[in-house]
Amino acid sequence: MPLPTSPWLSCPTPNSQARLRMFCFPYAGGAAQIYRHWSVALPPVVEVCAIELPGHGRRIAEPPMTQLAQLVDHLGTTLLSGLNQPFIFFGHSLGALIAFELTRWLRSRQLPLPDLLVVSAARAPHLALTEPPLHQLPKADFLTELNRYGGTPQTVIQNDELMELLLPTLRADFALLETYRYQAQALLSCAIAAIGSKQDAIVSLDEVKSWQTHTAAKFSLDEISGDHFFVHQPQLLPLIASKLEHLVR
């Protein structure tokens, strides 16, 4: 069954023959387009569907959301009709936290869970943030921290007009992360595959490894080269494809 038409979803290469649906959640400030070419590098029986949050990408004119619980509730309701076949979640950085809480949202309603939760460049949700919050910093300080993260091109940061457009979304995304309060629940029954990098100056490999405490099923940890935004590294997709082999046989 095809996915519902929704501003929350972007499926650039619909695949009616797919046996596995892969929902991809972007990092803070990221849009669905970062996953637009992923279907080419993954098995042909995988349909890649990226999440487009309010205030991002083609939804830039909409006000962004700042409360994770509210976002997950809207997103979960939207995805319900698309969970009619095996699926997995992939989330990078903030996207991993959204995917995790969405998985718990599904479980709380006795709905299907992903066959696999892939979390990338994200500290485990029970770990406290190690740095002061950024989302309410004055503009100059916020831009300094944004530059330290390294995911926003200098040409964008130095473009005052463009940054005025993007700042509300970026602040909202950091608010999602920084106002989140973890609530202990039973372990997930789905497997978790965690991916991290020793070169990541934002999230340590040990913080990524700590995801193992959130599943009663199989856990794996893989290391990849690159900074916090290694989601753009070409070696990531073959790694993800290897994680899907047993799911698409």
Image: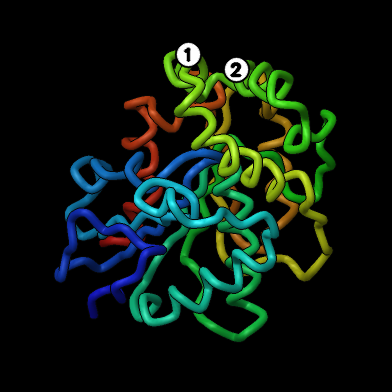
Q: Secondary structure at mark 1?
A: helix
Pointers 1 and 2 in contact (C-beta within 8 Å): yes
**Cα–Cα gap, marks 1 and 2:** 8 Å
Query: Which residue is depicted at the point 51% across and 36% down?
Result: 166
Badge 1: how crowded within 10 Å, few (<14), some, or many (20+)? few
Residue closest to the eye, 161 or 96: 161
Residue 147 badge: 2
User: How far across and how far down the image is residue 222, in percent?
Assistant: 53, 34
Residue closest to the eye, 200 or 211: 200
Residue closest to the eye, 56 or 105: 56
Amino acid beneath label 1: Gln
Q: Earlier in the sequence, mark 1 or mark 2?
A: 2
List the residue tagged with mark 1: 154
Residue closest to the eye, 47 or 221: 47
Badge 2: how crowded within 10 Å, few (<14), some, or many (20+)? some
Quarter of the image with the C terminus is bottom left
